[in-house]
Image (cartoon, coloured by chain):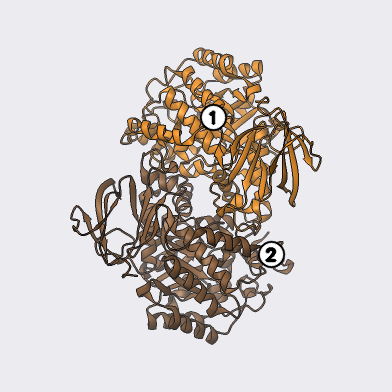
Chain colours: A orange, B brown
Amino acid sequence: MTDHFPSPIAIRNLILPTPRGYETTDLTMAQGRIMALGKHIPTAATWIDGTGKLGLPGLVNAHTHSPEMWYRGLIPPLPLELWLNILYQLPPLTPEQVYLSALWTAAETLLSGGTTVVDHLILTPGQELETIAAAVRAYRETGIRAFVGPLVQDRPFKEGVPGGTGVSAPGEVMDTKAVLALLQAAVDQFHCPAEGIYIMVAPTGFQQVSDALFEGCCALSERHQLRRHTHLLETKAQSLLAQEKYGGSAVAHLNELGFLGAQTSLAHGVWLQEDDWSILARTQSTVVHNPLSNLRLGSGIAPILAYRQAGVNVAIGCDGACSNDGQDLLEAVKLGALLHNTTTFEYRHWLTPYNAIDMAALGGAKGLAMADQLGTLAVGKQADLVLYDLNQASLLPHTDPLGLLVRGRPSQVVHSAWVSGRQVIAQGQLTTIDLTTLHQALRDQAPALIRPVATVEPALEAQYRAVMGL
Amino acid sequence: MTDHFPSPIAIRNLILPTPRGYETTDLTMAQGRIMALGKHIPTAATWIDGTGKLGLPGLVNAHTHSPEMWYRGLIPPLPLELWLNILYQLPPLTPEQVYLSALWTAAETLLSGGTTVVDHLILTPGQELETIAAAVRAYRETGIRAFVGPLVQDRPFKEGVPGGTGVSAPGEVMDTKAVLALLQAAVDQFHCPAEGIYIMVAPTGFQQVSDALFEGCCALSERHQLRRHTHLLETKAQSLLAQEKYGGSAVAHLNELGFLGAQTSLAHGVWLQEDDWSILARTQSTVVHNPLSNLRLGSGIAPILAYRQAGVNVAIGCDGACSNDGQDLLEAVKLGALLHNTTTFEYRHWLTPYNAIDMAALGGAKGLAMADQLGTLAVGKQADLVLYDLNQASLLPHTDPLGLLVRGRPSQVVHSAWVSGRQVIAQGQLTTIDLTTLHQALRDQAPALIRPVATVEPALEAQYRAVMGL
C-alpha cells in the first residue's frame, strides 16, 4: 500500500484536536507515512487546502460481520441466542454476494471515518476459501485496511446454549483439524500485511469452540504473527454456559489456553466478572465494545468505564449489520460515548468526545497490536487520515467540532480519507469503487435472497426461556 | 392550512405497514385530509407514483428547545443541573437568531419524518414576545405543525437543586402575574390552530414553578383549550427535590393542582415511582421519552416499557440540540426502540419497529390531544403523510423496510412530506424554505455567538455533588 503516492502530499491549515482544544497546522505524508506535522513542509509536496477541515486518525471498525449487510433490518427484536437461530436459517451467500457485502461494509466504514475494518467473516458452508477470497478482493479494491477473521467453530450450535439440548443449524460443524487446515490455507493464500490485508484467527466464541481449536489457533497465530479475535461473554446466557462448561470464568479459561494477549481482541465483554478485568488488563487484551448491537439484542450495557479504569483497552465496533442495523462507525462511537453516562452519577468519569475518538482510533489500533503504526496522527506512523468538512450542515455551527461530530448526527461529513497514504475518499466520494454500480448490484441481487423471515425453532425457544427463567 | 391544495392528490402504489406486514395501496388527499385509502380514487386527482415508497403518518417531535441549535455540540459531558448552569451562561439570542434556529429545527424534523414539533421555547429575557413571534414566523414559513410552549418559570434556578443554596442565573425570574400576562398575550397574538400554530402552556418544571403558576396555566389552558407541557422528573436530583418541596410525589402534586390530563405531555419522566404510573394512566397524561438527551445528560433510562404496560401513553422527542446533539427524529425513534431491550430479558415486551413508529406518531398525537386528527393514516384524519424512498442506499436492501428505517442509519430517506395536505418536501428537498440560504445565515451568525464555553460555578457544583453523594 506504500507505492501509490511516491511524492509527498501536504495538507495546509488542518484543524487537529488536542486534549485541551484545537490547533491549526500542516501535515505531510510520504511513502504511506506521516512525515511532518507543523510548518516544516517539503517544497516539492502536492498541496491540499485543509481550511475548515477537522483531521482525525482513521478509526477502527473493530468488530463486524460483513455478510450481514444483506439481511439488515430483517430480524425481529430477539436476544442473541434466538436471533442467531433465525440468522442461520437465512440463505447462505454466494462468493459474489460476499464480495458485494464486503465492498459495502468497507464503503460505509470509510464514509463514516473508519480506515480499518475487522471482519469476523461468516463463511458459506462448502465454499469457505472462496468466501474469504471474495471478501479479501473487496477490501483490496476499496483500499481499506482489513483484518479478516474467518468465523470458525468445531462444536455445534446446540452446545452454545446452557442445557445443551437445543437444535443444530444444518452443516455447521467441521472437525478441529479441518478448521485449522482451512485457516492455514487462508493464511497461505491471503495474509499480506504489506498490502493491508491481514488474516486473523477468530474462533467464533467459547460456546462453540473446543480447547483444541483455541490451542490450534494460538499455535497458528504464533507461527505467522496473526492477530486473535473471538466473541466473549456477550450475553447472560453465555455467562451461565461458562459456569456449566468450565465451572467458572471463561476469561480465566481462555487465559489458561494462552489465547489472551496484546494481539487479542474480544468482542462484547458485557458479562465479565470483576476478577476477569485484571486478567484482561494484565494480558493487554482488548474488549471491543459494540454498543448498538448490545442494545439491539438486549445483551446489556458493557461496563466499559470500569474496564478503562481497570486498565483494560477498549475499542469500538459496529458489529454485523443484522444487529445494528447499519455500518456507520460514528453512530457506534456516539453510543459508545453516551450510553455509559447512565451507569454512574460520577460525571467526572463520563467519556468526553476526545476520549471517544481515542477509543475508536488508538483503542482500535491497540486491539490489533498496531498502536505503533496507527491510532494517532504522529510522525512516522501510517498515514491513515480522515478530514471532516466542518461546513457540512450537520456540523454547523462551529461550536466544538469534535463535540458535534461525536455527539451530533453527522451525515456526509467525511471529505477526504487516506489509508497508508493512499487516498480513498476525495470530495466526499470514494475514489476506489463506484457506489452507484454497487448499489445497483445490491438492488439486483437482493430479491433472490430476501424471503419471509423464519421463526425461532420452538425447542430452542423453550430451552432458552427455561435457562433465563422467563 | 387547508386551502393550499383545493384539488385532490392521489398517490398510487404506496407501501403501507400493517401490524403484520405491508400492503400496497393508493391514498387520496383533499382539503387537507385523507379522503380515501384503497383503490377508490377520484378521477380528477393529481397522480403521484408511490412505487418503492414507504408511507407513514408524520411523526411528532414531542419535545425540543429550538434555540439550542446554536450551541449544539458545545457543552461538556455533565448532568442536567450543571449542564443548565453552562447553558444559562451562553449569550441570549436575538429574535432573528431564534427565527433561524426555529427554521433549522423545523427543517431537521421534517427531513427526518416529523410533521409536528413541540417547541418548549427558551425565551430571550426582555424580548419574550418577540422570541415567540420569531419562532412562530419560522414555523409558518416551513409549514410544519407547531406547538410553541413558551418556557416560563417564576422561581429562581437556585431553588431547582435540592438544598436551595445554589446560584441564580441573571435576570431569570418574572413574577407569576407577569408570566401569566405574557402567556395571555402570546395566545392572543399567535394561537391559531386553523393554521397549524398552537400556543401551549409550558411552565419549565416543578423545580422552578410555583403552585400559583401551575394553577394559572391550568386556567389559561381551560379558557383557550391549550395543550399543557412541562418537564417532569428528568433527574434523580429532581426526585430528591420533590421530596424536599412537596414531601412526596411531584406527580401526585401536579395532579392535585389539576395540571394533568389528556392534553398534558410531560417531558422525560425518568424518575417516576410506581404509584405515579397509575396517576398518569388514569389522567391520560403522556410521557415524552427523549432517549438521546437522557443518555447525554446521564439522567437514566426511563422505564417506558413499564409505562406502556401500565397504560401510560408515551411519545418521542429529540429534546434540545444541546443535549442530543442534533434534531434527527428517526435517531430518537431508534434509540427509543432499542434502549429498553437492556431493561428486561423478556424479549416479548421489547418494542418492534411498528411499535416504535406508533409511539412516535400516534403516541405523539395523543400527547397533544390530537389522536382523532393525527398519528395514523386513516380516512378523515389530517393529511400528515411522509414518503420514504426505499431505494436510498441506507434503506437497501428491501428486507423489512420499517425494520431498517427504525433500526438502521437512515440518511436522506424522506422523499416527500405533506402537512395537512400541503406539500413541504418534494424529491427530498424542502419546498417551503431554501436550506442553502439558511445554512449560510447560520454560518454568518454563529461566530458572534460561539465563545469558549463557561465553566460550572463552583458553589453549584459543590452543592450538586453533596446532594448526589459524590
x and y, in percent, of residue A284 in the image = 69, 32
Given residues B426 and A253, the one toward you in this image is B426
Q: Would you identify the image quadrant in which residue A222 lies? A: top right
Q: In the image, what residue type sits under mark 1?
A: Asp
Is B286 displayed left or right of A54 in the figure? left
Q: Would you identify the image quadrant in which residue B72 lies? A: bottom right
Please tell me which residue is depicted at 75% across the width and 52% down the height of the picture.
Answer: A20
Q: Which residue is mark 1?
A: A119
Is B358 displayed left or right of A399 in the figure? left
x and y, in percent, of residue B258 in the image = 42, 78
Q: Which residue is mark 2?
A: B466
Secondary structure under tag 2 reads: helix
How many angstroms separate mark 1 from mark 2 (CA)? 47 Å
Given residues A180 and A282, the one toward you in this image is A180
Disc 1 is attached to a residue of which chain?
A: A
Is A357 displayed left or right of B110 in the figure? right
Secondary structure under tag 1 reads: strand
Q: In the image, what residue type sits under mark 2?
A: Ala
Given residues B371 and A30, the one toward you in this image is A30
x and y, in percent, of residue A206 in the image = 53, 27
